[in-house]
Image (spheres, rainbow, N blue to C red):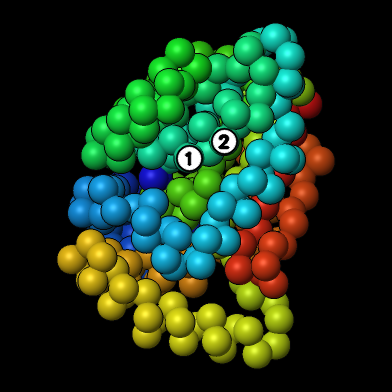
Amino acid sequence: MAGYGPVMEKTGMDREDQTTHFGFRDVPLGDKQTLVNDVFHSVARRYDLMNDLMSGGLHRVWKDAMITTLNPPRNDAPFSLLDVAGGTGDIAFRAAKAAGSGFQATVCDINPDMLAVGRERATKQHRDHQVSFVEGNAETLAFADRGFDAYTIAFGIRNVPRIDAALREAFRVLRPGGRFLCLEFSTVDVPGLDKIYDLFSFKMIPPLGRAVTGDADSYRYLVESIRKFPKPNAFAEMIRDAGFARVSWQALSGGIVALHSGWRL
């Protein structure tokens, strides 16, 4: 997976002097990617199981909603998807299942451990011909301009050190008429649910992570990173600033997550 609050920048400062959030800690901008990589190296093999346990299976509903919104063609029309920070292939496989024979997906993730899990799943699901896996950085994608019909990123953009750079890259690699979709944890907007959600997040998820993966700290970071991510309206404005038009977002499950959309027109 491959950011949340804005980078603290001052005129004339070098990248190593800039800071960003890693959970509730401020860290040098240049250190964040290594710290995030360590998190996902630790949890890669149990990542999908933990998603089920943490969300009570709801992550499947949220991802299905993303694919319904993506609406890939169900015929043999060519359609090229770039799924960023999607190492285990969850979004790409769902899209391939919903699409026709003209569908191709490229999964790009900075973490080789997550990609290894995705490749294994592709083989088991006989999706090797439709879904390929590439190691890469969301901030500096190694793909040509205007090469994809859609760009998806699910629960990954908050881990990117420079979200604005990732959004500009998303715009660059999309063809005119291409769609950007981002599924990300958001701000609970139901009175009472917010307190229950916080209690579960901070008191239950780290111990659950320790029991299932042997790593509580990584899941403590993931919980904290959700709280540091921009509010939906602020993130929508960042998407607009990257060049996207018709930007919108939809709250799901009382605001636990939000599905953001934008178009390159």
Pointer 2: residues within 10 angstroms few (<14), some, or many (20+)?
Answer: some
Q: Quadrant of the C terminus?
A: top right
Instruction: Kindly tell me whether residue 118 is visible in this rendering.
Output: yes
Looking at the image, which residue is at 50% across and 66% down? Answer: 55
Q: Name the residue nearer the viewer: 250 or 131.
A: 131
- Circles 1 and 2: CB atoms closer than 8 Å: yes
Q: Which residue is mark 1?
A: 90
Looking at the image, which residue is at 38% across and 37% down? Answer: 87
Q: Percent from the top left, x then y, of residue 81?
A: 58, 24
Which three-letter amino acid code belongs to the residue tagged 1? Answer: Asp
Q: Percent from the top left, x then y, of residue 61?
A: 62, 54
Q: Secondary structure at mark 1?
A: helix
Q: Quadrant of residue 206?
A: bottom left
Q: Percent from the top left, x then y, of residue 213?
A: 23, 62
Tell me the tag on residue 94. 2
Query: Seen from this angle, which residue lies furthest left?
Result: 214
Q: Name the residue nearer the viewer: 228 or 238.
A: 228
62 to 127, vertically: above or below: below
Is 76 left, or right, of 163 in this rendering?
right
Is 235 left, or right, of 139 in this rendering?
right
Is 4 left, or right, of 238 in this rendering?
left
The answer for how far apart the CA atoms under marks 1 and 2 are is: 6 Å
Q: Quadrant of residue 27?
A: bottom left
Instruction: Kindly tell me whether residue 24 is visible in this rendering.
Output: no
Q: Name the residue nearer the viewer: 162 or 133.
A: 133
Q: Secondary structure at mark 2?
A: helix
Looking at the image, which residue is at 53% across and 81% down? Answer: 197
